[in-house]
Amino acid sequence: MSKKKLPDIEKDFSKWYQDVVYQAELVDQSPVRGCFVIRPYGTAIWENIKSALDKRIKETGHKNALFPLLIPKAFLEKEAEHVEGFSPELAVVTHAGGKDLDEPLVVRPTSETMIHFMFAKWIKSWRDLPMKINQWANVVRWEMRPRAFLRTSEFFWQEGHTAHETVQEAEQEALLMLQEYVNLAQDYLAIPVIAGLKSDSEKFPGADKTYTFEALMPDGKAVQMGTSHMISQNFAKAFGMSYQDKEGKLAYPYLTSWGATTRLVGAMVMAHGDQKGLVVPPKIAPTQVVIIPILKKGADNGAVLAVAHQVKNKLEATQCSVLVDEDETKSPGAKFFKWELRGIPVRIEIGPRDIEQGKAVVADRLGEVKEAIALDGIDIFVVELLEAMQNKMFERAKARVQAQTFKKEKLVDFGKDLAAQGGFYRTGWCRNPECEKQLKQYQAMTRCLLKEKTFEKCFHCDQDSVSDVLVAKSY
Amino acid sequence: MSKKKLPDIEKDFSKWYQDVVYQAELVDQSPVRGCFVIRPYGTAIWENIKSALDKRIKETGHKNALFPLLIPKAFLEKEAEHVEGFSPELAVVTHAGGKDLDEPLVVRPTSETMIHFMFAKWIKSWRDLPMKINQWANVVRWEMRPRAFLRTSEFFWQEGHTAHETVQEAEQEALLMLQEYVNLAQDYLAIPVIAGLKSDSEKFPGADKTYTFEALMPDGKAVQMGTSHMISQNFAKAFGMSYQDKEGKLAYPYLTSWGATTRLVGAMVMAHGDQKGLVVPPKIAPTQVVIIPILKKGADNGAVLAVAHQVKNKLEATQCSVLVDEDETKSPGAKFFKWELRGIPVRIEIGPRDIEQGKAVVADRLGEVKEAIALDGIDIFVVELLEAMQNKMFERAKARVQAQTFKKEKLVDFGKDLAAQGGFYRTGWCRNPECEKQLKQYQAMTRCLLKEKTFEKCFHCDQDSVSDVLVAKSY
């Protein structure tokens, strides 16, 4: 790895992001436009996020299944809004097994149609409900302006799909999974988020309602972190998903779907990174602690290495993931640089002099702690430090977002600031899409509707506000 | 689930297999030819296999990464044997993002070409070696005669790809992973396997050597369980994967790749199933123990259910996965039928009379144990029973394979028996492909070469045998 300097994070955040994902070896460019290789370090972070979410998906009563990658193109056409929304992004297989296909297949952009086709086979009676399925999968949506993790032609995600007897149950499900996502973002990724409903123009093609959770990045742009939908009964009807209800009558189930993607990795990078590189929250860090033994070339480093491994074993006994960087060809300085770039939460330096004093130097990636700690209780110190860091990262991000959040009445007054500096703008809205369109001239859009109504009037027209709305620029 | 009878496993094994995978809800047919839906129960078994293998892949120093699904068609054409081998099976994307593509993309049938392209970027010096990468992925190879798990157009697998300085190191790697596969098959799936080299005509398109591990099914047909390849340096050269070696000279690395797929689930079904359905080895069973409380309709079943849950908690404390079937609408008999069909290793029946005696009836899925056991020590009894079952299933399968394995000298003498009843036939071979072709008339082929040489002459011609070979019919 060459020792390149990252672009100035304050002056060019976008360039900083583009460089840091490569330099920290999260991703690499692939020969296929819009598709990235997720390298081992990026994959390990995604696996940790996945495993935390998968556990909760199972604990809330869902079961994983695997559905085909390829979907008959005609399936997408069964629901008018759905096909209109996805058509421009489809990758289409026209040839397979040495022959032209009679009917083209699309690489799934999402699996509602395939899974609803199967639901129609499986749901015959109210006894089969609720049906609660999840799939971990790759999907393809052709992307014209690719950006690692944030906008990629192929991405990885989970997609939950459920069917229920009543609209209330379906709504409960959609909100439950939204809350699980919020918990994941806040408790694991240490990213504060705001959850709410998408406006009609921003909802999923084929949904009655789309719930979203939104985060604000340091450059003032919002990231849609994931969504949870109340799917229109049009789908149930298009796929003939009728069943016999408790009264023996024919009924159609109420559907939900919800998904979160590898985009979460990108949001984590942006939310916490600094001039030195990534800062990975301890709960999802593949390596939580790196131990750097201070080695002397040609000298006998046995004692130092032995202590380094003792500390490693001690920490691993507390479930920490630890790496000892034994490379004798690199200086401690080069190692500090490397592991800071990768955002390892805690660094421990152990040299001969430290050992004489029965101590080691513990430093955190936030630059707030750097202390000589007695080897005796170093495991307890590090475990507590990791916990404190996780909390501090969330609090720090929260304070930042608060400083970037504004309550304003009229777009004409706040539009220019929004366009120039970004940020979350909370305001009132009459819910007329014509007013929503006015946001475009400031490169902004509605992100979500908020529950609490605190404005009298719409941000644009003279009508009364129906609900508060969060407005921002976005990725 | 309807109570259908399975086809006679002795008379029509093939039909039995086809029915049991649906009735036990492992898979369902999808609307796309050759692609199956893997239902929650099948997915849970695959997740357990995956997690056991993933752990060993990481412990042996490999790192997971994620590479693009779509590969430029021209990449496959860079290695002549490779493209010839895979062309007939490719699914091709010709249209994406609303436009015809200038260059068609294939849905990966395997990722050598994509990963080698990236290796060429990453490997610049001997210090970058060995490079040891693994990917969990879906792949597509268009299948004309689909069969659930065994032959499917889309399947799931891991593919390991490594690069090394010396051919010896590469060989060591290929053999190490082969051994990991053998351990997985034998220790987790309880399937005895025979490992060895594929003949030249049966090796991977583009490999110098292919190691395989083969299992024999009750109907006498062999299943290739997975493979580990020494990849030809043609690949390294085609992708310009040169690096500076220790002497400062330009060199090409030695490559391996190795994969195991969802086919393992199918082999497990066939190797252990019986007339009642699946028998899932305890180590990969998503549910190891089902507790069936003997409930009376309309009566107060509180006491029975309470004890059932006490036993569940006790067992879960020993890491068992346990399910209590509380459904009041179904008879105990119907429940026995259902869980036997799904192959749950251990069943516990708890009725009011059992509780009076402080006991519960424990039965294993092999039909060998059915005993009233004191509730007091039931957890220890069950844990030991599960361990014993795992071993017994392996021993039982081993005895079966031994009874189906023959050592014979001449194809003319054993060919008819082989064609009629199947089985593993060990014999001598001169290594001439012309002799190998003779096997076709008996619907058989070479499965792998064996290390120990015990025959003087070739099974077909008068030439000396070069090595023993295992011959069988196959899936």
Image: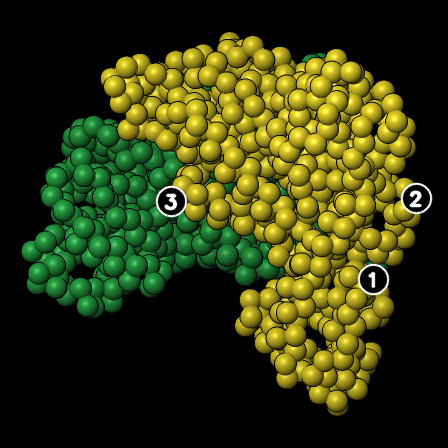
Chain colours: A green, B yellow
User: Residue A45's mark?
Assistant: 3
Q: Position of residue B81 (x, y in %)?
A: 58, 13
**Could one spot residue A358 in this view of the protein?**
yes
Q: CA distance from mark 2 to mark 3?
A: 51 Å
Q: Position of residue B270 (x, y in %)?
A: 76, 45
Q: Position of residue A111 (x, y in %)?
A: 61, 38
Residue pointed to by mark 2: B11
Residue at left offset 60%, top offset 66%: B320
User: Residue B337's mark?
Assistant: 1
**Could one spot residue A30 in this view of the protein?**
no
> Label 3 marks which chain's residue?
A
Q: Quick check: B246 above or below B388? A: above
User: Residue A187's mark?
Assistant: none
Residue at left offset 62%, top offset 22%: B203
- Helix, strand or loop under label 1: helix
Q: CA distance from mark 1 to mark 3?
A: 43 Å
- Helix, strand or loop under label 3: helix
